């Protein structure tokens, strides 16, 4: 049976049509009292955004979720996990500082902040899932201890997953650093001809996998070399490399990565049947994840906001809406894709984002069938 995915566009000509009012309307349509009970501790899963990024979901919008949960007599808290790569969110204290700098302060968002996996990403437990890649998955304790969840996702592109929505938000977002490492099976290497020896990858790597070595073909010049046995596959070097010299075996490794990620999404909601709600913002659909310390121009014009109870269905609906949209002028894909084309494949030609939906349906994470209900 197709699940309902509720949708509002971004048009507004009065206060009742503001984005904030629309979020409230979407949450009401979900009948949150079915999933959230009086006295529940409710994790609101968000991405606080890396410093330098400005495409993450606004705390002003997210507050409506906290308000709705409080109105049911439950106790909401905003939460995310620490990152695998170095940056402004790799430990609990810095992560909180970044969240507050981005407006996720109690006075703005209306609920306390909790870093779900603790100060050094060591607060987690294992969940049994018995799937193809993992029999057990590592999930941050705060998500396991929460009675219910409301998952707020920013639907956008991703340089490895193709796109990131509810599934990726659950998978990477609910896993501690060790769980993220398990999902990142990919191992990167350097295309010597493209490397300019800038050393940025050496600076960025959290495990010192890259090193600069003397080039044999050009005296006085160096190139980076990555120790693939040491590499943890976080992909930060590939994302940030100014000449795109760092890559991987996309044909072999990307399918495994995407399936592993989808299995972790299954683990994140284990034991919470009918107790997880989803909001997805299909606006500022930028090419890269909010983990990037920048935000490129959106791939498509702003589309709207979705709400549902099935992570596969809500991601499928978001993907379909973006596919049907024209490319945005001056975007990365201008002239490369139009209505009906896969915008994420145009932005990241080696990715296979639809695996998330296909494999997610196969392992029982959700269904790709949905009924779009316009509010």
Image: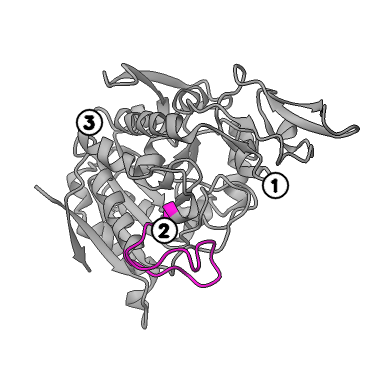
Percent x, y of residue 151:
35, 45
Marks 2,1: beta carbons within 8 A: no
- Kindly tell me whether residue 105 is visible in this rendering: yes
Percent x, y of residue 209:
67, 23
Identify residue for label 2. Answer: 343
Task: Please check the rendered image and state whether residue 116 is part of the magenta-colored stretch, yes or no.
Answer: no
Task: Please check the rendered image and state whether residue 337 is part of the magenta-colored stretch, yes or no.
Answer: yes
Percent x, y of residue 49:
55, 48
The residue lying toward the viewer, choosing from 139 and 320, is 320
> Which segment is the magenta one?
324-345
**Residue found at the far right of this picture:** 220
Is 231 displayed left or right of 39 in the figure? right
Looking at the image, residue 216 lies above or below residue 17: above
> Which disc number belongs to residue 37?
none
Counting residues from the start of the chain, the first of labels 3 and 2 encountered is: 2
Counting residues from the start of the chain, the first of labels 3 and 1 encountered is: 1
SS at mark 1?
loop
Gap between marks 3 and 1 measured at Cα: 38 Å
Gap between marks 3 and 2 measured at Cα: 26 Å
Is 255 displayed left or right of 60 in the figure? left
Is 44 displayed left or right of 229 in the figure? left
């Amino acid at each position: 049976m197709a699940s309902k995915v509720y949708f509002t566009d971004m048009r507004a000509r009065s206060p009742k049509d503001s984005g904030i009012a629309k979020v409230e309307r979407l949450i009401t349509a979900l009948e949150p009292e079915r999933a959230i009970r009086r006295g529940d501790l409710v994790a609101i899963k968000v991405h606080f955004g890396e410093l330098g990024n400005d495409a993450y979901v606004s705390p002003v919008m997210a507050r409506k979720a906290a308000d709705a949960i409080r109105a049911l007599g439950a106790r909401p808290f905003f939460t995310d996990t620490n990152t695998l790569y170095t940056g402004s969110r790799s430990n609990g204290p810095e992560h909180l500082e970044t969240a507050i700098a981005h407006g996720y302060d109690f006075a703005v968002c209306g609920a306390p902040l909790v870093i779900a996996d603790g100060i050094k990403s060591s607060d987690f437990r294992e969940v049994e899932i018995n799937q193809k890649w993992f029999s057990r998955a590592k999930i941050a304790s705060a998500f396991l201890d929460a009675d219910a969840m409301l998952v707020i996702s920013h639907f956008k592109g991703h340089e490895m997953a193709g796109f990131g929505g509810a599934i990726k938000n659950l998978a990477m977002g609910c896993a501690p650093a060790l769980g993220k490492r398990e999902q990142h099976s990919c191992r990167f290497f350097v295309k010597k001809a493209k490397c300019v020896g800038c050393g940025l990858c050496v600076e960025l790597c959290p495990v010192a996998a890259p090193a600069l070595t003397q080039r044999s073909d050009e005296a006085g010049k160096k190139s980076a070399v990555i120790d693939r046995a040491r590499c943890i596959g976080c992909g930060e070097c590939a994302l940030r490399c100014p000449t795109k010299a760092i890559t991987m075996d996309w044909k072999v490794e990307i399918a495994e990565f995407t399936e592993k990620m989808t299995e972790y999404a299954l683990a994140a909601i284990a034991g919470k049947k009918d107790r997880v709600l989803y909001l997805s913002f299909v606006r500022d659909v930028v090419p890269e994840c909010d983990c990037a310390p920048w935000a490129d121009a959106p791939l498509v014009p702003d589309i709207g906001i979705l709400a549902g109870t099935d992570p596969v269905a809500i991601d499928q609906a978001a993907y379909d809406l973006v596919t049907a949209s024209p490319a945005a002028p001056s975007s990365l894909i201008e002239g490369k894709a139009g209505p009906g084309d896969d915008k994420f494949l145009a932005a990241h030609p080696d990715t296979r984002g639809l695996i998330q939906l296909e494999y997610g349906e196969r392992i029982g994470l959700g269904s790709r069938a949905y009924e779009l209900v316009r509010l």
